[in-house]
Image (cartoon, rainbow, N blue to C red):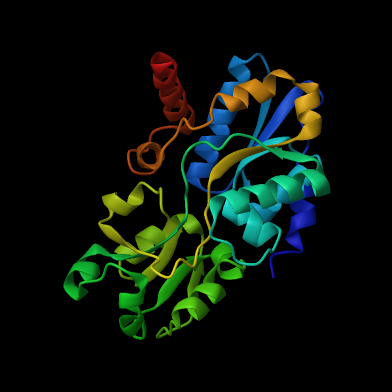
Amino acid sequence: MRAPLLPVIVAAVACGGDDRVTICSKNFTESILLGEIVAQQLEDAGMAVDRRFNLGGTFVCHEALIAGQVDAYVEYTGTAYSAVLKLPPERDPARVRAAVDSAYRERWDVVWTEALGFENTFAILVRGSDARRLGLTTLSQAVPHARAWRPGFGYEFTERADGYRGLVAAYALEFAAPPAEMDLGLVYRALASGEVDLIAGNSTDGQIAALDLTRLEDDRRYFPPYEAVPVIRAGALERFPAARAALAALGGALDETAMQHLNYLVDVEKRSVREVAAEWRARQKTRT
């Protein structure tokens, strides 16, 4: 069980103080990139920023936020709805957004700002060679073949309500062996190398094309919508009034293709997160 580690991790995170906005991220590339984009956006608006990136999974970042240890990070609507709030399945993006808006404000005085413009859903992936050989385009088509496969998932996917157990039930999946659990950053290479045969990745990950992986369509619409949105404590907005407009300016600025490209630059081309974020923001400024 990983949950008992959470209070220790949260307790170890110190806020930057009343004169700084503390931004955290989860422990995968896209979250770190989005955290850096938010941090640079706030710095350009005149705020001092304390970066606490690669903090941990969803629950670590959430607990740090509501405990006042950090001020903001980028969360996904479906993750908040299913994993944090543990609400029943809902596929309508507007209803999911309304539910998280209301619950986060009422329970924790946390504000969901403007959506960044893309959705990052779980992507069920197989090797491209297997997909072409077997003629697979959907998850339902993969079900008969899964009996000979071993899946591999990140730790959080195996634990979440919108993760492994629900997926297996929705598609009546049976595998040859229990899932191999590993860090999310390792699942792509494990699939490409043949260590596992099916994984749950992120739909905007740059490694999908680079490693010739194929995303299987969620044809039974199991996964909820996962819009990326900066969340920030209301107290931080009161301390830093300029933060609201700065974050609003990011609304709709990133589509799925652009986010996948940014992830590719970091994960495949090994560019620095800060440099990639700065270049993207510079391009955005020339368009406005």
Question: 254 above or below 239?
Answer: below
Residue 283 image-quadrant placement:
top left
Question: 281 above or below 106?
Answer: above
Q: Please state which of residues 138 and 174 is positioned toward the viewer in this rendering.
A: 138
Which quarter of the rendering shows the N terminus?
bottom right
Q: Residue at x 69, y 64 (%)?
A: 86
Q: Please state which of residues 103 and 24 is positioned toward the viewer in this rendering.
A: 103
- Residue 57: tell me if it is visible: no
- Residue positioned most to the left: 133
Which quarter of the rendering shows the C terminus?
top left
Counting from the top left corner in percent of width and height, residue 168 is at 49, 78
Q: Residue at x 36, y 59 (%)?
A: 189
Q: Please state which of residues 244 and 59 is positioned toward the viewer in this rendering.
A: 244
Counting from the top left corner in percent of width and height, residue 215 is at 33, 61
Q: Please state which of residues 145 and 78 is positioned toward the viewer in this rendering.
A: 78
Question: 225 above or below 287?
Answer: below
Q: Residue at x 41, y 53 (%)?
A: 203
> In the drawing, does residue 1 fall left or right of residue 179?
right
Question: 183 above or below 18?
Answer: below
- Residue 145: tell me if it is visible: yes
Q: Residue at x 28, y 55 (%)?
A: 211
